[in-house]
Image: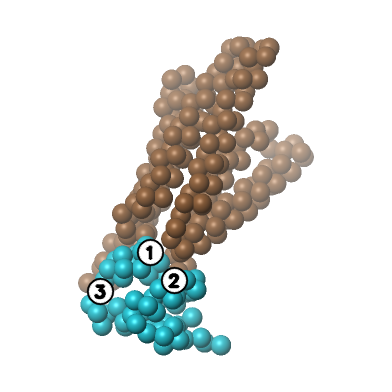
Amino acid sequence: MKNRLKVLRAERDWSQADLAERLEVSRQTINALETGKYDPSLPLAFKIARLFCLPIETIFQDEA
Amino acid sequence: MTSERGEFRALKKFLLFAGFIGAMLVSVRVGALGGVWSFVGGLGTVAASLAFAYGANRVFRREPLRPPVRRYLLRFGVSMSAYVMLLIGATMLHRHGLTAGPLGYVIALAPALAILGTIASMGFYLAEETDEFHREVLIQSLLWGIALTLGAASIWGFLETFGKAPHAPAWAVVPIFAVAMGLSQPLIARRYC
């Protein structure tokens, strides 16, 4: 699933480690999410949306 | 600049795998010398596995050891060391004919108890790992470990049945499983990079 995490993170000048700390996940989780090869769980997706104050569907785009 | 850094990282990954395989081979050779060297070689294989796990965390995950991983490596290291010592000790006692009678059961089961500890340490890690991506990688690596161990055991078993391979003890499956699972973890994580 495609997402805008990398752009949103860059806009705030956060490193992967910064974002990982804010979401209480590992840096590798952020890396895997940004490549679009790993889809987050629903709770993590909501957490990401809350952190960026954006609706989930504006962060994650369903390719189907 | 980026590609240079990428090449350096690839070299570190290669050195990590090469170092692990080299350390395991040296440990096995040392262990084959017998006597006290059996214990040295045995503990060498455990130390090599722990060093590989620590190095893989640095090179592949590029983050400090997180508490669940640290607890797992500690539990695994202690129980695996105990297993190696008890296994070699029990084998030595058996060779000297000291395992006759009821005490033989205790000596025979002592390494098995330690290996149950290593299995439990994997279970604890699965229960304690809070990071969802690491859990995903862990579950996949457990499945790869199971598949490779079952495959290897089946191939060896058939070769043995048809007299093409010497007898291999059934307890070898757990160390084989641990190595297969450990090696597959960074390879699985690579798919998400």
Do callouts 3 and 2 mark residues in contact (Cβ within 8 Å)? no
Question: For the view shown, which residue lies furthest in the right direction?
Answer: B162
Q: Position of residue A2 (x, y in %)?
A: 45, 83
Q: Amino acid at mark 2?
A: Leu
> Does residue B20 appear anywhere in the picture?
no
Q: Position of residue B30 (x, y in %)?
A: 43, 29
Give the Cα distance between marks 1 and 2: 9 Å
- Residue at image position (48%, 35%) is B80
Sequence-wise first label, 1 or 3: 3
Viewer-proximal residue among B5 and A24: A24
Badge 2 is on which residue?
A: A44
Give the Cα distance between marks 1 and 3: 15 Å
Q: Position of residue B133 (x, y in %)?
A: 46, 64
- Residue at image position (60%, 17%) is B94
Chain A's colour? cyan
Relative to A17, residue B148 above or below: above
Sequence-wise first label, 3 or 2: 3
SS for callout 2: helix
Chain B's colour? brown
